[in-house]
Image (cartoon, coloured by chain):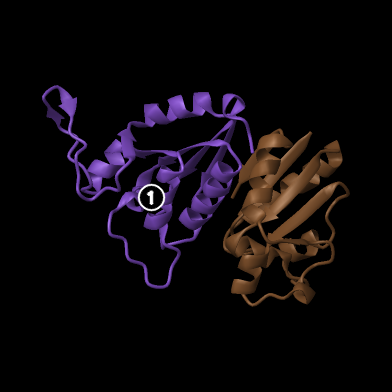
Chain colours: A brown, B purple
Amino acid sequence: MRVCLLLMKTPSSDEDAERMLGILRGAKAQGTEIAVYLLGDGVLCARKGQTGYVGLNLGNVPERTTVRASTRDLRARGISDGDLEPGVEIIEDLEGVFIEDVMEKAERVFTW
Amino acid sequence: MVESSKKKTVTMMLFSAPFGSQYADHLCRVAERALDKGYAVEIFLYSDAVHAQMTEQNPKLFFPVGEAVKRLIEKGATIKSCEICSIARGYIKGELKDGKKDYSSTKVINGVNFCSIYGFVDMLSRADRVLSFGGS
């Protein structure tokens, strides 16, 4: 199964980012393929060097998981490519890639 | 581009007000890309999200949600707004007039329609995928 997760919140504004990562862990256990999309404030989860729960975990995502962040939203927040966790894909048309994944490939989608 | 006879439908619910957060911006951008790729798009505005239907929005520095809503309608999106939420916020009266509910308003962008939460359930029944945008 392929699952898309769209995160639009900061790592620490509430517990939603943490919940998303809980799903990531569960998916890893079940062998589910996961695509994480970071939009708006969600791109802040991709910054490396975070001491919080989210940063540590996004830097160590399970196999078969892709993490994609919006170029526009990274730049809007002054985040350069070198600031990101290794493996995070920077996508110019994140909305287009996301919706195509949701409609054509994924069987489930969750948004926060 | 998806062939029209095989169009899949994505239904999106917005429940946060524009400008207070970026959820409306994100929904509009995802919806527009979905339309560009040939998918059918249905949007339900709920709670404070009904403010996205307001005419004459004039954000100087923020994403122009009102313009995006108009563009989505022009591109074929179906946009329905919660009638109770809209009555509560003064957009429509919703009173019976000649046997029909009065949804006339100069405050609402042309092409935005109204329904109850049960109408949203109908939208869900047609959806291939459902996305929600909003929160604290």
Residue at mark 1: chain: B
At x 43%, y 54%, the residue is B68
Count of numbered labels shown in the rendering: 1
Q: Position of residue A96 (x, y in %)?
A: 64, 50
Residue B136 in view of the camera: no
- Tell me if residue B22 can be seen: yes
Quadrant of image for the N terminus of chain B = top right
- Give x and y (percent) for residue B55: 28, 54
Residue A10 x %, y %: 61, 63
- Residue at image coords 39%, 56%: B67
Instruction: In the displayed orientation, state which residue is furthest to the left.
Output: B98
**SS label for mark 1:** helix
Picture quadrant of residue A75: bottom right
Residue that badge 1 annotates: B70
Q: Is residue A100 left or right of residue B51?
A: right
Please report the residue visible at 72 percent of the width from the left and 51 percent of the height from the top: A36
Label 1, residues with CA under 10 Å away: few <14, some 14-19, many ≥20: some
Please say if B41 is above or below B128.
Answer: below
Residue B92 appears in which quarter of the rendering? top left
The amino acid type, in three-letter code, at marker 1 is Lys
Question: Residue B34, located in which quarter of the rendered image?
Answer: top right
| Image location (x, y in percent) of residue B73 | 41, 43
Q: Nearer the viewer, residue A83 or B79?
A: B79
Tell me which residue sits at (77%, 37%) in the image: A2
Left or right of residue B89: residue A71: right
Identify whether A7 is placed above or below A59: above
Toward the right, the furthest residue is A63
